[in-house]
Image (cartoon, rainbow, N blue to C red):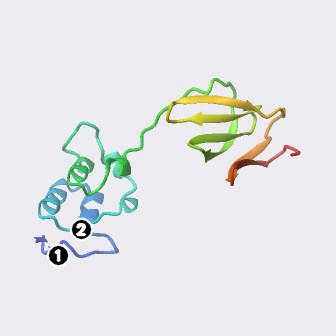
């Protein structure tokens, strides 16, 4: 198949015809390429605004067409923003986040506790660090079965 005289399987600047059509928001070109099963490979990292092309419930969006054709998965483009209240007032409470056993742990910066987030259950809790003051730790990392916070102004 040719579109405006170009081979749809060719790549220009390492970008497939389908990626070019998606990047340019050319719905008709996307439909044609999908219909003729041409240029089905797509690298979603080359299309940074792909999730913006997804309008939930609207089957006329480019992302919905790519999902329906099995070219991309909804998880590849759907970034769902959810807010879970932590119940702690103030600014600059935590700085840094690490995952351990399906939970997220946030290092206390100005807060007096580690924030623990269970995103699956949408629950939060805190673990007292028994250290007062501001700018205690900045960053957190997992090593083996332990989490370590990087001291900023904390002595340990």
- The residue positioned 24% from the left and 55% from the top of the image is 70
Across and down, in percent, residue 9 comes to 21, 73
Q: Is residue 96 above or below residue 85?
A: below
Residue 104, given in percent of the width and then of the height, sits at 60, 41
With respect to residue 26, does 9 lie above or below? below
Query: Percent position (x, y) of residue 134?
Result: 80, 36
Q: Is residue 92 visible?
A: no
Query: Residue 145, percent across and down?
Result: 69, 50
Q: Nearer the viewer, residue 29 or 142?
A: 142
Q: Which quadrant is home to the N terminus? A: bottom left
Nearer-N-terminus badge (2/1): 1
- Residue neighbourhood size for the residue with mark 2, other residues' Cα within 10 Å, grouped as few (<14), some (14–19), many (≥20): many
Location of residue 115 (image quadrant) = top right
The answer to whether residue 100 is left or right of residue 57 is right
Let me know if residue 118 appears in the view: yes
Residue at image position (34%, 74%) is: 14
Image height of 89 relative to 38, above or below: above
Q: Which residue is mark 2?
A: 17
Q: Are marks 2 and 1 in contact (CB under 8 Å)?
A: yes
Determine whether, in the image, residue 136 is placed left or right of residue 4: right
- Disc tally is 2
| Point 74% across, 46% down: residue | 138
Q: CA distance from mark 2 to mark 1?
A: 8 Å
Instruction: Tell me the SS state at disc 2.
Output: helix
Of 144 and 11, the residue lying toward us? 144
Mark 1 residue element: strand
**Residue under the image location 15 percent in, 64 percent down:** 37
- The residue indicated by pointer 1 is 7
Task: Decide if residue 88 is on the left or right side of residue 18.
Answer: right
């Amino acid at each position: 198949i040719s579109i405006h005289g170009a081979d749809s399987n060719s790549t220009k600047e390492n970008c497939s015809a389908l990626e070019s059509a998606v990047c340019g928001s050319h719905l008709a070109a996307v439909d044609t390429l999908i219909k003729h099963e041409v240029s089905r490979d797509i690298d979603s990292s080359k299309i940074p605004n792909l999730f913006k092309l997804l309008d939930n419930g609207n089957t006329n969006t480019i992302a919905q067409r790519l999902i329906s054709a099995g070219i991309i998965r909804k998880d590849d483009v759907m970034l769902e923003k959810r807010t879970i209240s932590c119940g702690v007032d103030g600014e600059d409470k935590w700085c840094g986040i690490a995952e351990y056993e399906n939970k997220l742990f946030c290092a206390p910066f100005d807060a007096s506790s580690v924030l623990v987030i269970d995103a699956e259950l949408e629950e939060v809790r805190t673990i007292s660090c028994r250290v007062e003051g501001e700018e205690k730790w900045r960053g957190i990392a997992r090593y083996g079965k332990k989490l370590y916070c990087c001291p900023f102004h904390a002595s340990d």
